[in-house]
Image (cartoon, rainbow, N blue to C red):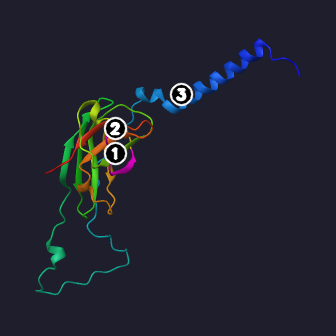
Amino acid sequence: MGRVTRRQRWGAGVVVGLVVAVAGLLWFKPWALWVDETVNEALPSANPSPNPSPNATSPAPTKGAPPSASASRAPSGPVTVAQGSFISHEHATKGVVKVVRLADGTHTLRLEGLDTSNGPDLRVWLSDAPVKEGKAGWDVFDDGKYVNLAKLKGNKGDQNYALPADVDWSAYPSVSIWCDRFDVSFGAAALART
């Protein structure tokens, strides 16, 4: 076996340096800070009852019979039951978050006018941690109970996230745009019942 030359050591160092640089770029994704993803979803509507099959027939109403209770009640539209405004943490964040009860009784978390930075692995979290201003609030949301609702659809615009039926959203008074990669809040909002 021959000796390793200075040129071979230098070449190996360059290869290792390139591998580390590429891995770092893939991990940190710095380009995401300059790429905006805008989502503009309408508030979802929900049918209070399932659609009947095309072959189903409704019984004819009896003449003079009072209308049924379900026919006399008009379905209520979406109702905002809680809301809050985002404050900035790691990145400047603006917008409003709402918990909306739909006509079928389900709940949706709605982000309106969201404007924050993009980043790697951003999530929408419900948390039992209080919303705190400044650096003191950047990393508190994973200290207690939290629910990872979904990956953030876009860093700008209006978007909806269905709240699971088995989650009592009122036990989580805070919403955070959470960077799961670096365990830090980009911005958060305290929910207040309306």
Q: Is residue 45 visible?
A: no
Q: Under tag 2, what secondary structure? A: loop
Say which residue appears at 23% left-offset and 52% top-offset. 99
Residue named by callout 3: 25
Residue range corresponding to the magenta coloring: 140-151
Q: Residue at x 60, y 26 (%)?
A: 20
Question: Which corner quadrant of the image does residue 107 belong to?
Answer: bottom left
Q: Nearer the viewer, mark 3 or mark 2?
A: 2
Q: Position of residue 161 (x, y in %)?
A: 33, 51
Mark found first going from the N terminus, 3 or 2: 3
Marks 3, 1: nearer the viewer:
1
- Residue that numbered label 2 is attached to: 139
133 versus 165 height, above or below: above
CA–CA distance in space, label 1 to label 2:
8 Å
Within 10 angstroms of label 2, few (less than 14), some, or many (20 or more) residues?
Answer: some
The one nearer the camera, 160 or 22, is 22
Q: Are marks 1 and 2 in contact (CB under 8 Å)?
A: yes
